[in-house]
Image (cartoon, helix red, strand yellow):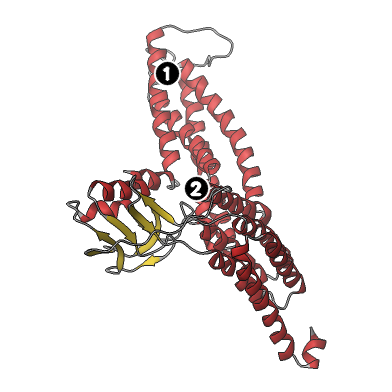
Amino acid sequence: MTATIKGLTQRFWAIPLLFAVAATVLALGVTAVDESLDTSLHLPFLFAGGPESARALLAAIITSMISFTGLVFSITIVVLQLTSSQFSPRVLRSFLGDRFNQVALGVFVATFVYGLVVLRGVRGTAQVDPFVPQISVTMAFALVLTSVLVFLAYIHHIAQSIRAATILSSIADDTRALLDERIAADAEPEPALLWPDGPVRTLAAHRPGVLQWLDDAALADAADNHGGSIRLLRAVGEFVATGAPLMELRGESTLQDDFWHAAVHLGRERSMDQDVGFGLRQLVDIAERALSPGINDPTTAVQALDHIHDITRRLATRALPPRQRTADDGRLLLTVPQPRFDDYLALAFDEIGHWGKDSPRIQRRVQVALRDLESAARPEYRPAVIDAIARLQQSSSAEAHALSPSDVALR
């Protein structure tokens, strides 16, 4: 059930479909109110035309709104293509999950569906049994005006959303929010509990996929109720092949394998549900793409490094407790492998330092970030930062020694 809800919230069509259903119900309800009045209301703000005029107005609304919706969809597709080629394919997921884009498309679809349903309620002619749902037709006109305002806001939103600064800030903000959720700033270091001895049953993955998220509470409760323990063999964000070991179960359990599979969700790609490293991965990808010869945009790479510096500094000042659940008696119920600080650090700076070794701006920015991390990091993390600085300096020295005098002159 949880996986189904998560999947629906990430579908681009879910909110427009909900708006279309709501528009249908609204149109039927308002038309019923119009019929119950059974008289012409002579109010200045209500539609005052006959059946022919109502049909013409609704037909114009229906035709224009379906064209409007097609235009919005085309703009969205172009933006997705531009973003994928200019920045990184990994950022498409956030665009598809953009609630404003979904709501905008939903408003346009709802206006189209509303007008279509109201049109069927207009009956007769001006001379023979005329019936015009005045309130319904007036509301259709109001929805058109609303759609125009939403379209103007949509154009502004799209123009802002394809800016490098906006994309980077959005990814970084999601990563910071997830970091604050998963790793508290005041968390104290906790010793990792040892995996208990005893007979172990290995559960293999029933299909290929990336481990996107897992339900810690459900797994721990099931282990507690059956007097056992669970150990995940793959960290969140790792790919698991079909038939590869996924988890180990210790203790006697009558639960079917389907229960354990349902609590550990495998998807097509990494997501930001529980994977802090994926936020860094996206920022690093954008920086690397900006440093490629085809794009050659070191300023965007520096902007990405600014956010990477901030995120890694937050990591460097926090204890990274093991992802474990225990019973009231201290018995280990669940353990999940977690990246270490040096893993995050290598992900954040090694690749950018390699691909940006020809750019003095990038080299300086990486050095500034690492020096700041060295001074701010917890004592147990400082050796990893010192090693990262040494790797960067070694790479820069090797590159400098590999250049001949003519090469230096050409640069």
Q: Amino acid at mark 1?
A: Val
> What separation in Å lies between label 2 and label 1 (alpha carbons)?
32 Å
Q: Residue at x 68, y 82 (%)?
A: 394
Whole-percent x and y of residue 320? 52, 57
**Mark 1 falls on what kind of element?**
helix
- Compared to 140, does 213 lie above or below? below
**Mark 2 falls on what kind of element?**
loop
Which residue is tagged 2? Answer: 97
Left or right: 398 with respect to 211? right
Which residue is tagged 1? Answer: 30
Q: Of tags 2 and 1, which is closer to the observer?
A: 2
Q: Quadrant of residue 122?
A: top left
Residue 119 can be seen, yes or no: yes
For marks 2 and 1, the one nearer the N-term is: 1
Front residue (pair 141, 368):
368
Q: Residues within 10 Å of mark 1 (few under 14, many from 20)?
A: some
Residue at the left extreme of this rendering: 254
